[in-house]
Amino acid sequence: MTSDRLPGTVWFVGAGPGDPDLITVKGRKLLEQSGAVLFAGSLVDQAATLFAPEGCEIRDSKDMTLEEMTDWLIDAARRHATVVRLQTGDPGLYGALIEMTRPLTAAGLAWAVVPGVSSAMAAMAAAGETLTLPEVTQTVILTRVAGRTPMPPGEELEALAAHRTTLCIFLSITLLHKVQEALLAAGWREDAPILVVQKASWPGEEKIIRGTIRDIKQKCQAEKIGSQAMIVASPTLGAADWTDLIRSKLYDPTFTHRFRKASEKPHA
Ligand code: SAH
């Protein structure tokens, strides 16, 4: 390899929530042609080792500082045309994306992002639940509670929960008591359903816990769920069993839209 060749591109690829089959086709193609892969944490090593070619430099970033990671990526991009930074779920969610891209830009490197299936979507899929439901909630909030990372003013869970939307709560399983307190303070009922999914989409390792605000912490403790879990609070939970479901207008025979004329008159 000569030193005057053009540097490669660093691709920030979303690996998806864990099941290697849930990476995008584009992400997989990039891995297959990569010269170096820096992967984030234990949830994505499978995709890296399954799809990266023989001889690819593969490194786990779990013991590296941000500077060490960006130095590694910059060095790799001087030697390889395709370098992949593989991250769980989508790289734009709690992924330190901008902290990593700025030093690359400063070093004159090209970079791009390939989105991924977030664990928020995977958790709901695993439980057969929906994020939105007509006339129940049409809004999803992706958030966390304050741990060592503080929440910006106005984004406290209690304030967000007041909207009664679907709340997908990342990085907070060890702070379940704070989630309980915030939801109750925002006026949610103690028996409102809560879903916790650990290792969503991981074949053989996924755990789905259904409870209420009151008992979810005990249930998670009983199942020893202390990491890699998504907490969902939503007025849509359990809708598969409701008797009074309001159907979606899009598929209602009385509703005309761009692709279909109404086949029936609206009911009186
Ligand atoms: N970028 C990732 C989130 C990284 S932050 C995404 O889009 O999913 C790490 C947090 O994501 C974990 O604390 C957990 O709350 C959640 N998480 C990641 N993978 C998960 C999985 N397979 N199942 C459940 N939660 C997961």
Image (cartoon, helix red, strand yellow):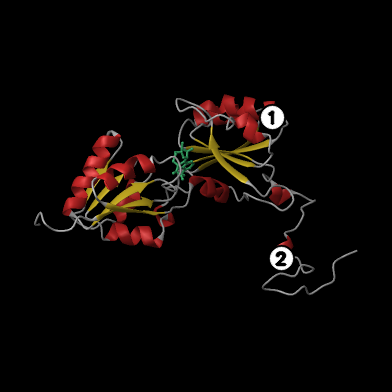
Percent of width and height locating residue 264 = 82, 72
Q: Is residue 93 left or right of residue 48?
A: right
Q: Is mark 2 within 8 Å of ligand 1?
A: no
Percent of width and height locating residue 72 = 22, 42
- Label 2: how many residues lie within 10 Å, few (<14), some (14-19) or many (20+)? few
Q: In this rendering, is residue 18 above or below 209?
A: below
Look at mark 1 in the image and give the residue it sits on: 186
Percent of width and height locating residue 34 = 25, 57
Depth order, front residue of 205/66: 66
Residue sitting at the far left:
2
Q: Between disc 1 and disc 2, whose residue precedes? A: 1
Q: In this rendering, is residue 256 above or below 212?
A: below
Residue sitting at the far right:
268
Depth order, front residue of 150/251: 150
Q: Residue at x 68, y 46 (%)?
A: 236
Look at mark 2 in the image and give the residue it sits on: 251
Q: Is mark 1 within 8 Å of ligand 1?
A: no
**Tag 2: residue type?**
Tyr
User: Which quarter of the picture shows residue 100?
Assistant: top left
Q: Residue at x 50, y 37 (%)?
A: 229
User: In what element is the residue under mark 2?
Assistant: helix
Q: Is residue 241 left or right of residue 8?
A: right
- Label 1: how many residues lie within 10 Å, few (<14), some (14-19) or many (20+)? some
Percent of width and height locating residue 163 = 68, 38
Q: Is residue 113 left or right of residue 57?
A: right
Q: In this rendering, is residue 107 above or below 172?
A: below
Depth order, front residue of 215/28: 28
Q: Residue at x 72, y 30 (%)?
A: 187
**Tag 1: residue type?**
Ala
User: In what element is the residue under mark 1?
Assistant: loop
